[in-house]
Image (cartoon, rainbow, N blue to C red):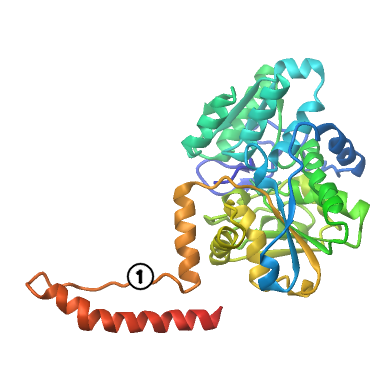
Amino acid sequence: MCDCDSTVSSGSNIAKPSGVGGDGEILDPACDPNNPKKLDFSRVALAYVLIRDGIQKTPCLLAHLSKITGMDVYIKCEFMQHTGSFKERGARFAMLQMTEEQKKKGCVAASAGNHAQAMCLHGLKLGIPITTVMPVIAPLMKVQKCKDMKGNVIVQGENMAEAKSIALKIAQDTGAFYVNGYDHLDILAGQGTIGIEVLEQVPDVDAIIVPTGGGGLIAGIATAVKTLKPSVQVIGVESEACPGFTNSLAAGKPVLVQTKPSMADGLIVPVVGCNSVETAKGLVDRMILVKEEDIAVGILRLIELEKHVVEGASATAVAALLSGKLDQFIGKKIVLILSGGNIDTTVLSRALERGLAADGRLIKVYAKVCDRPGGLTELTVPKLNWYWKLGIMDMWKNLRRS
Ligand SMILES: Cc1ncc(COP(=O)(O)O)c(C=O)c1O
């Protein structure tokens, strides 16, 4: 499920850009598609100084993936933040930028997961009251985690669009500060601190690969990296299920895309952020789309090779690598941003099954068994032999294909 808060008209999958009025919809003045703003590096630098005592400087490790790809592959472990994702960076910086008067009134956010948890944790740490509106489809575990961090959690709205409308209404009624999780400039600045850290940790990096949803993460990182070391390529990855940022960069402004369900649920945003697109234009070198099957294999490889459990969004970066779309970097150094680790156990088990099947290591055999005496023997001896051979042949074909 998407962690972001793009506006989707209720009852359909058709979205309008955030900030667009009509039908009594409340506008978010910080994210106005008619007046998009560009992030400045000085804001990222300020965020870097201000948040460093309150978030983890996550490790950036040489990965075992290097051996199978012929590149020096580093993984930036943002899933090691306390709430399991990079979202804490932007959330903390946005709150630190509030006036004392605003802090008393608190913040309001709409999110189904990572942004909500990040807001609740840093609200608790900074003594700022947080209200998060979570749609009814938000996983109970994530709702509970926000409550455990003393968030005022309102579970309302059929989808993220409805949750966002409710959150904006609360902000209007109470004077609380509404924080868009992927398009407020302070959020972009906070996420951009990852770019500064990567350049410190791997100074001779050739490319940074960034999972992309609403665009706040890639816009922030691209601003930092292209200011400090313009030769480093910044490459975004999305699932084929939602090419929102790819299409929007091509159009030069946010455009609506029809989405499909994806294992990278955090990246499914029908209309990306207007400030994010405005910022990323001309800074992002390339966007890559990956298949769902490759995301599953990415999750599997990270567990088997690196011993890291990540969510689908993070695994898109590995999927881009394993699908050969980054082969231009063979012999070079790349950093994959592993942006989050909050994967439901049910989703994880499905992803592993799918990944093993794609690898040709899991075979399902369907057989009719006669319920008369001897039926099982008949199945197990000659038929199973036959199915087994078939299975081996399928596996062999799959292995040759991969
Ligand atoms: C784990 C994870 N990775 C990447 C992203 C994409 O971030 P952005 O929406 O800023 O592009 C998200 C967004 O929620 C996320 O939760």
* Residue 176 sits in quarter: top right
344 in relation to 317, above or below: above
Tell me where residue 383 sits by quadrant: bottom left
Q: Position of residue 2 (x, y in %)?
A: 58, 46
Task: Name the residue beneath numbered marker 1.
Answer: 364
* Cβ at disc 1 under 8 Å from ligand 1: no
Is 138 on the left-hand or right-hand side of 69? left
Q: Is the residue 387 above or below the residue 155 in the image? A: below
User: Whole-percent x and y of residue 401?
Assistant: 54, 81
> In front here: 276 or 85?
85
Q: Residue at x 19, y 77 (%)?
A: 379
User: Vertically, is 100 above or below 5?
Assistant: above
Between residue 267 and residue 20, name the one nearer to us.
Answer: 267
Q: Quadrant of the C terminus?
A: bottom right
The location of residue 382, given as percent across then percent down, is 21, 84
Q: Is residue 344 visible?
A: yes
| Amino acid at circle 1 | Lys
Residue 278 is at least partly visible in this image: no
Residue 121 point in image, percent of width and height: 65, 29
Q: Which residue is found at the position 61% from the left and 32% from the top?
A: 165
Q: How many marks?
A: 1
Q: Residues within 10 Å of mark 1 (few under 14, many from 20)?
A: few
Residue drawn at (63%, 23%) of the image: 170
The residue at the point 15 percent across, 76 percent down is 377
Mark 1 element type: loop
User: Considering depth in this image, is 109 or 331 the residue closer to the camera?
Assistant: 331
State the residue in front, 351 or 301.
301
Taking the image as shown, residue 120 lies to the left or right of residue 393, namely right
